[in-house]
Image: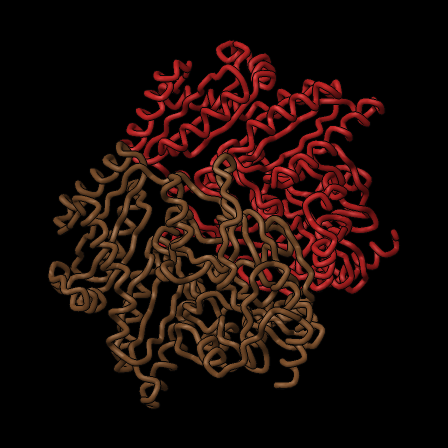
Chain colours: A brown, B red
Amino acid sequence: MRNDIEALARRVGDIEIKTEAYYRYAYSYDATGRRGTCLGVVFPLGLKDMASIIRESSRMEIPFFIRGAGTGFSGGAVPGGGGIVISTEKMRRIIDLDMEAGTVEVETGLVNRKLQDFLEPEGWFYPPDPASMNVSTIGGNIAENAGGPRAYKYGVTRVYLRSLTWITADGDVIESPVEGPAALLPGSEGTLGAVYSAVLSILPLPAAYMTTVVTTKTDEDAMKIASDLLSIGFCPSVMEFIDSKTMKCVSKYSRTEVFDNGGSYLFFEIDGSEDLVKAQQKILESFCRDRKLESVTAADDRERDLLWELRRSISPSLARKGITKVNEDIALPLGRLADAVTFIHRTASELGLDCYLFGHCGDGNLHVNIMTDRRRKEEMKRTDIFVEQLFSEVARMQGTLSGEHGIGITKIRYLDKIFSHAELDLQKKIKSVFDTQGLLNPGKYFSS
Amino acid sequence: MRNDIEALARRVGDIEIKTEAYYRYAYSYDATGRRGTCLGVVFPLGLKDMASIIRESSRMEIPFFIRGAGTGFSGGAVPGGGGIVISTEKMRRIIDLDMEAGTVEVETGLVNRKLQDFLEPEGWFYPPDPASMNVSTIGGNIAENAGGPRAYKYGVTRVYLRSLTWITADGDVIESPVEGPAALLPGSEGTLGAVYSAVLSILPLPAAYMTTVVTTKTDEDAMKIASDLLSIGFCPSVMEFIDSKTMKCVSKYSRTEVFDNGGSYLFFEIDGSEDLVKAQQKILESFCRDRKLESVTAADDRERDLLWELRRSISPSLARKGITKVNEDIALPLGRLADAVTFIHRTASELGLDCYLFGHCGDGNLHVNIMTDRRRKEEMKRTDIFVEQLFSEVARMQGTLSGEHGIGITKIRYLDKIFSHAELDLQKKIKSVFDTQGLLNPGKYFSS
């Protein structure tokens, strides 16, 4: 194996392959905490490098794992062993900003936040905003078809992809719109091709925002209020749900006592022109008045930032609650959420598990977190039972196993709850069309 | 061949295959006016029938062409000969309305308008609204991934597909979310599988609408005004462009003189709650005042219907202008539209062609119509040159050959302007995964 890497290194000439233990360790896990193994890590500097590494790996039949920032929640970037990790982190150029067309072309190693920071002074933004946006890359966002709070109004990554420059498993370079075969790339977790760069649609920055947190008595109330608000024509850009346990945890973490009153929470943001934001805020306020709901609205940018900080602190604050976070992100029709929440709390409590719920309830996307410890074998078994029951219920409710975190390795064994045998068979065949030798991120989505 | 059909008829038992000339003629063309040939037409009454016909056709290696209402603009439903047409027109049941989940399940032969008529009294609507909606079917809309005026705000058909029950080329039935392999079905024009039914997302009907037509001096002005309005936070549900020649033609057809002043037109609709619609209308009105633009706003439902009738009369009114309508629907980034319009008018005039432009300018989707006569060979040659030049320019501007009409047979020879050889090769391989024997709508998208 080691000899293989040495031979590969000779063939790719001046592109260095790092084989030190430090690299092999640091680049072999993701946010799930699961660790894989690899023989080396390589950092292409551009399209030529990346295509050349893939072409030579392909000739030598060495598997390769494209990696962004490794912030994924399903193991998509965890290498399965015996191959090399191709990190995109040194390919982070902004190639072209075309304000007339409303597009920006970037290398996929660019961090989402860096793109936003570049666009903002020019008066633009790129809508996908996964919670990981401060560190996760555009390439990783494409691989998982990432969403985020704003996806409720603006849609997920796929919506903003105009064209891709990508490398096939054989090392051929293709530049094309996201149609036909390339339409399968977003969300396929690097199993069908390696995306080098993308032309992304961007939008003019809204002139105004209004951010409000509404307290509700129970989780089920929150879901009902969310539907009722939508049905009277309220159209926020962000509509998030946070259950009481999660909010308690966040409040403690960020030392805020305002939201620690045992209720559940809806987090809204409205954006648009000044007038439209005001008109929308009126709808929300009069609704809260009629229903006697408590609400807090950010008075200025500083308060808005504080509210967003609370929302973004959910993941880090939960991390204190247990060594291992089993983090599922189911997606359901909006009207099913209340039933799903009841089911989840009941099942978790029956199994004696510590469960935290939050998510993008506007999209029907709920994050279900069990805080546990991998070393407590018996509790892990109960967690497995929980996940199994959760996914069966989700399939029954016509939902999907992943709203935005992908299938990776953690959900691969549940695919048959959603897809029939005939479809899984089609997936495998499609995989073999894109990747004859099975070298692209083997063992993941499309290959099981 | 005739014997094949007789043998097939025996194998499918009590499902009648119509072989009379009347059927074979009536079911072998679409709105392009191009006619194909077929050996017979069959009208399955449900999933069992449809799967059985496909299974037996597949065993006998008889090609089959799934057909909705035949209103397509690219020949997608035109049979390529030697096979049977499977019409969905007798499968038009509404299977289930689930208001709690916000979904409706329908057989794909259901006409889009019939679905809207069913949903409206219940307080819901299904957003995709192709111009053909009074006659076109949900299945045809899925096959072409249809849009419509409202797609600007609400997105195209794909966005509203929750799950599909579809039949593979071998006759196997698959029920699945629109993910993995099934994600390729919308827009694939019946070349990868036959969709029997769909669970669709629906939305609560907006409480209010406001419809306004704004007159601009030139086409280029219209495009500039459209961008400027969006950049100040105006967010209509519909934003259509109609050029002066097209509007003249519509005005004559519908005997309205209001819009026959030589200008170009923007057609806006705003929807939402009463308050929000009013706030948006204010933005539009003050913009028009500042720019000294003439505008007409519908005062009530009757006037709204009149304006929509004008918009919907575009196709029938153009039909009077020539025997043959060469109708392309390019899609471009919004900021490229003004340049594209200039290019189109100049090229058409240089080639002495009668050209009409309109479309969903919010989505960058422009309908380019050349009114001609198939029998005038020399003019058809000039039309071919026009289309060739148009598509080259569109490719250069990073646009696509079809916003919503599909590839069908009319655009198949231009696919290489958008897709590389490697990609076209992938398309063929994917086609053969779904359809080993090449029996599903052969000769169309994915098989060229």
Foreground: B13 or B359? B359
Image coordinates of residue B320 in percent, x first then y, are 68, 18
In the depicted structure, whether residue B199 falls above or below residue A393: above
Foreground: B350 or B62? B350
The C terminus of chain A: image quadrant: bottom right
In the depicted structure, whether residue A253 falls above or below residue A335: below
Residue B178 located left or right of residue B172: left
Residue at 33% across, 76% down: A325
Q: Quadrant of residue A400?
A: bottom left
Image coordinates of residue A236 in percent, x first then y, are 30, 45
Foreground: A361 or B254? A361
Residue at 28% across, 69% down: A316
Residue A448 in view of the camera: no
Image coordinates of residue B348 in percent, x first then y, are 70, 22
Q: Quadrant of residue A131?
A: bottom left
Residue A397 located left or right of residue B57: left
The N terminus of chain A: image quadrant: bottom right
Residue A58 in view of the camera: yes
Task: Looking at this view, name the residue that lies furthest to the front.
Answer: A14
In the depicted structure, whether residue B249 falls above or below residue A146: above
Image coordinates of residue A359 in percent, x first then y, are 32, 61
Foreground: A246 or B29? A246
Residue B114 located left or right of residue A306: right
Residue at 39% across, 33% down: B231
